[in-house]
Image (cartoon, helix red, strand yellow):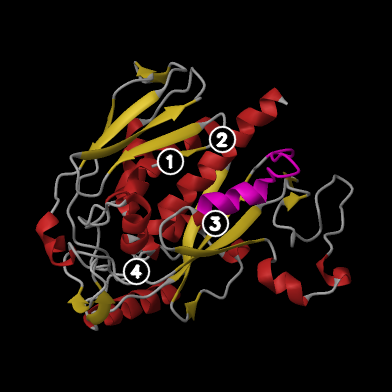
Amino acid sequence: MAGNSFGNLFKLTTFGESHGEAIGGIIDGCPPGIKIDFQAVQDEMNRRKPGQSAIVTQRKEPDEVKFLSGIFEGVTTGTPIGFVIENANQKSKDYSHIKDAYRPSHADYVYDKKYGFRDYRGGGRSSARETASRVVAGAIAKQMLGSIQIHAYTSSVGDIFLEKPYQDLDFSKVESNIVRCPDQEYADKMIEKIKQIRKEGDTIGGTVTCVLKNVPIGLGEPVFDKLHAELGKAMLSINAVKGFEYGSGFCGAKMKGSEHNDQFNIDGSTKTNLSGGIQGGISNGMDIYFRVAFKPVATIMQNQTTINKDGNEVEMQGKGRHDPCVVPRAVPIVEAMAALVLADYYLINKIY
């Protein structure tokens, strides 16, 4: 199976399955001399880990990171950083009922057809558990990036939208509630929505908005390696992501050029920022902001008709521990992938 690595100079390769002994990764290209705050890495993992609240999967995983190489006396050495995260709470029997059946909207069918084999225990490599390794690497990348700030938050759950511009939000409040929405009024509505959906044995989707501040001018490589193109690829590689837009996004398609153009100030900044901090695929020093759409989790606790590997129609119902809404736990994953992209382009920019 190919496609297990992300990045060019700052590269992450991940390994492991949802119900295997462990998951982990290798970070290649991290410069030497970076002092690592291990607690900050674990704090990022705690934001993503299962079992953290009443509105996420109740699988209990400590998600403690063990670093194997590339860090000596708390400082990066410039050699590959290897790490593992043990899987402590697998319940593979929860998946025995779908050993021969394909779950609707999961990767079961295509994995079986492509590879002639599939790990039915939670989806194996297709499980969102793989994203824990991305969060570790993203936490390292954040520490490498210094003054660059990365803020993601839940901006919608189902039809409940936080209708406030990010400039009016206090990012310090993102972690003040279990849905990770920086506005408590909307957070309460989102939490209630997720609880209601869970009682119905169903799931719901939503969006995560991310804002990148203090990004220097010049990150991004035309023509095919534009900064927003790589951010889009990073976000679309996350499980359950169905959409990505940056700057004015799809709303910009409704506007006239006279309305959309970002006019310059004398210092090179712009009066508006509908470009989303990127022009010609290169960062322009303004805030970069984008939104990522997540579909409803495919496993639902309701009867569904599907097919098995023999091509027969069968009825199945989801079992086990699953998120009714993936969005709250996706917030740190979005931040991590953004950090990986910025770290990669930071290093590329130093060379070219």
Please say if 94 is above or below 201: above
Q: Which residue is mark 1?
A: 2
Disc number for residue 210: 3
Q: List x then y, in percent, for residue 154.
A: 45, 65
* Residue type, label 2: Ala
Sequence order check: which comes first, mark 4 or mark 2?
4
Q: CA distance from mark 4 to mark 2?
A: 30 Å
Q: Which residues, given as a range, are shown in magenta?
A: 216-235
Question: Mark 3 vs mark 4: which is more N-terminal?
Answer: 3
Give the mark toward the camera: 4 or 1: 1
Cα separation, mark 3 vs mark 2, equals: 16 Å
Q: Residue at x 30, y 51 (%)?
A: 129
Q: Label 2 belongs to which residue? A: 343
Q: Evaluate whether residue 143 shows in this view.
A: no
SS of the residue at dot 1? loop
Specify few, some or many for label 1: CA neighbours under 10 Å numbering under 14, 14-19, or 20 or more.
few
Determine which residue is flagged by label 4: 297
